[in-house]
Image: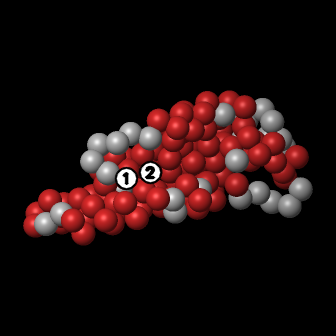
Amino acid sequence: MWSTYFDDAVGEVERRLHAATGRARNVTARDSFSFLHLPLVAGIVLLALGSRRRSGAWRNPLKLVPAMALCGGVALYFLADVAFRWRGLGGRIDRQRLVAAGACLALVPLATALPAWAALVCVA
């Protein structure tokens, strides 16, 4: 997730902010770097919650709530990243990240059937 965040988009959003003036600059900065970063962080926290296992428990399947946290956390992160890019880059939609978010949500039933380590590998 780190490498998906720190690509060229953040620098381009910053350049657009420097070029903007007045209220447009303030609103874009507020939306992009405040409001839309909250779900990014929430996605990371959910991923951490879903991947937290006791020693030896990685052989067992995840229950529904940890599976939702694991898969849904990554999906939330990607959806928030798409929204960040859309807001900061003037309406561009990153379809690959939308597909990745959908694929992570589709993994929830699989994550409740496979061993926890395999579910984590699938999400990765």
Which residue is painted at 10% across and 67% down in the image?
22
Question: Could you tell me how far apart the alpha carbons at marks 2 and 1 are, in whole angstroms?
Answer: 5 Å
Tell whether 54 sits left or right of 7. Answer: right
Secondary element at tag 2: helix
Total number of numbered discs in the rendering: 2
For the residue pair 56 and 7, the one nearer the viewer reads as 7
For the residue pair 33 and 69, the one nearer the viewer reads as 33
Q: In the image as oriented, which residue stretches furthest toward the left?
A: 22
x then y, percent, for residue 65? 62, 44
Q: Amino acid at mark 1?
A: Phe
The answer to whether residue 29 of the structure is visible from this angle is: no
Q: Which residue is mark 2?
A: 81
x then y, percent, for residue 79? 45, 44
x then y, percent, for residue 8? 47, 59
How many neighbours does mark 2 have within 10 angstroms: few (below 14), some (14-19), or many (20 or more)?
A: many
Tell whether 53 sits left or right of 80. Answer: right
Q: Is the residue 92 above or below the residue 22 in the image?
A: above
Which residue is painted at 58% across and 61% down in the image?
2
Q: Are marks 2 and 1 in contact (CB under 8 Å)?
A: yes
Q: Which residue is mark 1?
A: 84
Which residue is painted at 31% across and 65% down in the image?
15
Which residue is painted at 34% across and 42% down in the image?
92
Q: Is the residue 106 above or below the residue 81 in the image?
A: above
Q: Quadrant of the N terminus?
A: bottom right
x then y, percent, for residue 62? 74, 43
For the residue pair 4 and 115, the one nearer the viewer reads as 4
Tell whether 111 sits left or right of 97. Answer: right
Tell whether 55 sits left or right of 3. Answer: right
Q: Amino acid at mark 2?
A: Asp
